[in-house]
Image (cartoon, rainbow, N blue to C red):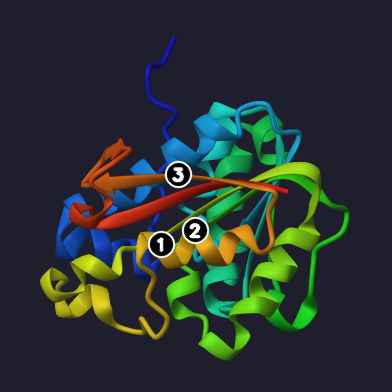
Amino acid sequence: MAILSGQSLELGPVTTDRYLGDAKRLCFFLSRYKFAAKMLRRARRIADIGCGDGIGTVTFLSDTSANVIGVDFDAPQIDYANKTLVKALRRMDPDRAKRISFECVDIVRHGGLTPRCDGLVSMDVIEHIAPAEEQAFLEACCDTLDDYGVAVIGTPNDYASPYASRHSQVGHINMFTPERLQDVLERQFSRVFMFSMNDEVVHTGFDKLAHYLMAVAVK
């Protein structure tokens, strides 16, 4: 039996930039999806809000049995996901490919997705949402979830901003401390559990020393 699938995948521009610019940045990014997949392992339908080119979204196909939809308002990235990523998946594993789809949607203006999901993930998105649209974004995320659905939301820690690279700060117009993230999410969700990350390591406590914040929120 052949060990390799024989498939090759051309990475999207954002993922290529992460990998070639500093490969460990891609490792850090994917480790966030690994954590989210563990938190959502029993989900039946997962929405990835702000999925970009979908390279992280694919994580859920291996670690859950859910149907997965990725949405982003960046049309070229969604175009890559549909024309390159999904096509490669279909060639390699048609059954898994049936469980994933991508749509170009601005969720702030569109509102919650239908049909609703019991799992939701949004990584590295909310810091790019203007403060005036923050509530609309979170309401749309909450409206996408069924009752008792679980959301995993990740964002850089504002306490670490002085040490962040110029590259990582681009477009960050709405930064969060652990306290503010928990407070904002508790206005929309019934329970919020806070985690922190340094590199690929997820932990609790010492959140002022963390570079990245992860919240697990229950509707």
Residue 64 to residue 49: above or below: above
Q: Which residue was labeled with disc 1?
A: 179
Looking at the image, is 65 positioned above or below residue 203?
above
Q: Residues within 10 Å of mark 2 (few under 14, many from 20)?
A: many
Inspect this view and state whether residue 27 appears. no
**In the depicted view, which residue is nearer to us: 178 or 1?**
178
Viewer-side label of 2, 3: 2
> Where's residue 77, x and y in %?
52, 71
Mark 3: amino acid: Tyr
Q: Secondary structure at mark 3?
A: helix
User: CA separation, marks 2 and 3?
Assistant: 20 Å
- Is the Cβ of the residue at disc 2 closer than 8 Å to that at disc 1? yes
| Residue at numbered disc 2 | 182
Identify the residue position indicated by label 3 in the image.
Answer: 33
Which image quarter: residue 178?
A: bottom left
Instruction: Name which residue lies at 76% across and 34% down.
Output: 44
Residue ID at (52%, 87%): 130
- Marks 3 and 1 sit apart, C-alpha to C-alpha, by 23 Å
Instruction: Identify which residue is drawn at 59% across, 69% down.
Output: 78
The image shows residue 110 at horizontal and vertical percentages of 78, 78
In this picture, residue 206 sits left or right of residue 94: left
Q: Earlier in the sequence, mark 3 or mark 1?
A: 3
